[in-house]
Amino acid sequence: MTNPLTAYIEGIGLIGPGLAGWPSSHAILSGQQPYQPQKTVIPPPELLPAAERRRCGAAIKLALATSLEAIAAARLDAASLQSVFSSSHGDGHNCHAICEMLASEDRQISPTRFHNSVHNAAAGYWSIATGAMASSSVLCAFDASFGAGLLEVLTQVVIDNTRSVLITGETEYPEPLHNVRPLPDALGIALVLAPQQSQQALAQISMSITNDAADQLDDIALETLRLAIPAARGLPLLRAIAQRKTTRVVLDYLDSTRLAVEISPC
């Protein structure tokens, strides 16, 4: 990457263990309040029709909750935004339920379970809830999924010269899959990015590739969370935005390649 990718963050959504939305999480990440881990609480997807609301799982609810929080903060219409969805595996609970069905004598897979099993299920439900008809990208990069999503959304914003929303999140697997992929809880981050500065802009970010070590969090519990859930790799970026200072943050990406992000408050 010869030249850094530059854009402006206009809205943030965050839900995770002890992180109930950006306003309260802002105080925690800025150091104004102590972090107290608690079970993640995901709000119900009120924008979905009743039938879809009953069918959707935790991963879809998480994506809707974080994205709508970020878009509301940016004072934008979700229907007009391009979107990038990024998750290391999708809906862990739905995957577990399908595996249970296949291991049973019946082996009759529910059609709802089946269509919710695809990796772009959250993007489909999001378009139903918001009426969005703009382009949507869905990707997976295992533990590098947050970095891959951020790189993709910044590229779209710069090349297409338009706003876009990054929606990244994980949900845990029940046992026995949890033993192989031990994610402790659900966590999601959403960012609305714009190519030019507006009155809603929170920070300017410029990203490039680096080999430097990724930044860690001072709070032991938050650092444990960052390492445990792929979407939480974005917490150092949110901490820098919450602290409202010009700084450089290095985010985890691939084994030998990381993302350097220059941040300036607006």
Image (spheres, rainbow, N blue to C red):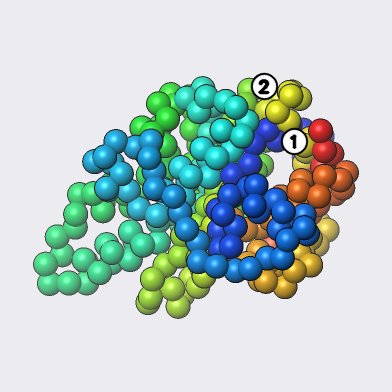
Q: Answer with left or right where residue 153 lies relative to residue 2.
A: left
Q: Quadrant of residue 10?
A: top right
Image coordinates of residue 100 in percent, x first then y, are 25, 69
Residue name at image x 86 percent, y 45 percent? 245
Callout 2 touching callout 1 (CB < 8 Å): no
Figure quadrant of the C terminus: top right
- Which one is closest to the eye, mark 2 or mark 1? 1
Tag 2 residue: 161
Q: Nearer the viewer, residue 66 or 117?
A: 66
Residue name at image x 27 percent, y 62 percent? 98
Identity, as a three-letter code, of the amino acid under mark 2: Asn
Residue name at image x 50 percent, y 61 percent? 40
Residue name at image x 60 percent, y 69 percent? 37
Give the structural element (helix, strand or loop) at label 2: loop
Q: Quadrant of residue 17?
A: bottom right
Marked residue nearer the N-terminal end (2 or 1): 2
Q: Badge 1, how many Cα within 10 Å: few under 14, some, many 20+?
A: many
Tag 1 residue: 202
**Distance in Å between CA atoms under marks 2 and 1:** 18 Å
